[in-house]
Image (cartoon, rainbow, N blue to C red):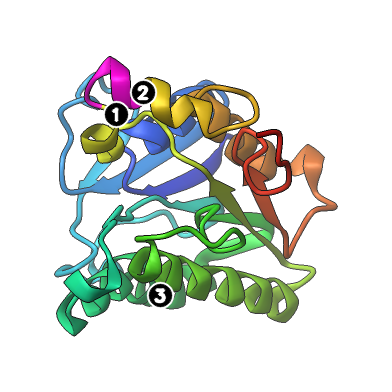
Amino acid sequence: MKKNIVLIGGSYGIGYEIANQMVQDHTIYIASRTHENISNGNFNHIPFDVLTDDIATIPLPEQIHGFVFCPGSINLKPLKMLNMEAFRQDMELNFFAMVNVVKSIVPKMAEGSSMVFFSTVAVSTGMPFHTSVAAAKGAIEGFSRSMAAEYAPKIRVNTIAPSLVDTPLAKRLLNNDKKKELMSQRHPLKRVGNVKDIANIAVFLLNTENSWITGQVIGVDGGMSSLNVS
C-alpha cells in the first residue's frame, strides 16, 4: 500500500517539485489555494487557504506518513519601513498558520512519519532587510526542534533553511539577468538555488530509509551560511 504524503501548498515551486518526485511511489495530497499545475489527475488536490480555512474540515487521509508545510513570504524591507502589521502578517502566514495546521494533523501522523518545514538562511546569517521574515522563520526553527523532541521516536521533524531559490515567490528578486547574476555572485557556489536543490533534500527527509535524522535545521544555501570566499 502506498504511503500518504500531505503538502500544504504544492501547486507550484518547491512543493510541486516534491510532489512530482514522490508521486510514483506515494499517494500525494496537495492542500492549496491554486491548482493550475495539478489538474493531470496524479495528485489529490484539496482547496485550502491556510489563513482562512480550518484544516480539520478537509478530507485528509486517516494516516499521514509525510507532511510538508510550504507557504511562506519574502518581505524584504528596511526596519524603518516595516510597521507592526507587516510583522504580524509574516508571523501569521509563516508561523501561526503552520502551528494551527500541525496541531490539527498531529493525531493523524503515523508511527515513523516525517514532517518537513522551511526556514531561511537569514535566521543563522544576519542579513539587512530581513528582520520580519527572519523573525518568523526563526520561530519555525525553534518550534521544529521542540516538536522533534516531544514526538520522538514516533515522528521525525526537520527544517530546511534555503538561500534564495528561483521560484515564483522570488520572482521580484530575480526578474532580470542582472539581478540573477548579482544574487548568484553572493553565493560561494556562484548560483542561486532551484526547486530541485530544495526538493531533493525534502524528499530525502521524508524517506523512511533516512530515518535517523530529526531535530535538524539543514542549510541548503550554496554555502552562504558557512563559507566566506569573497
Specify which label sits upstream in the sequence, 1 or 3.
3
Residue plotted at (65% across, 47% down): 219
For marks 2 and 3, give the one nearer the viewer.
2
Residue plotted at (24% across, 48% down): 32
Main SS of the magenta part reads helix
Q: Which residues are magenta?
A: 175-180
**Residue 174 falls in image quadrant:** top left
Residue 138 image position (x, y, % from top left): 52, 71
Residue 127 image position (x, y, % from top left): 48, 58
Q: Is residue 42 above or below residue 32?
A: above
Residues at badges 2 and 1 in contact (C-beta under 8 Å)? Answer: yes
At label 2, the amino acid type is Lys
| The magenta stretch spans residue 159 | no
> Pointer 2: residues within 10 angstroms few (<14), some, or many (20+)?
some
> Pointer 3: residues within 10 angstroms few (<14), some, or many (20+)?
few
Of the numbered discs in the image, which one, if any, rests on residue 104? Answer: 3
Q: Is residue 213 above or below residue 14?
A: below
Distance (Cα) linking label 1 and label 3 = 36 Å
Residue plotted at (26% across, 57% down): 75
Provide the residue designation for mark 2. 180
At label 3, the amino acid type is Ser
Say which element carries label 3. Answer: helix
Residue 72 image position (x, y, % from top left): 33, 55
Of the numbered discs in the image, which one, if any, rests on residue 174? Answer: 1
Q: Determine if residue 87 is in view.
A: yes
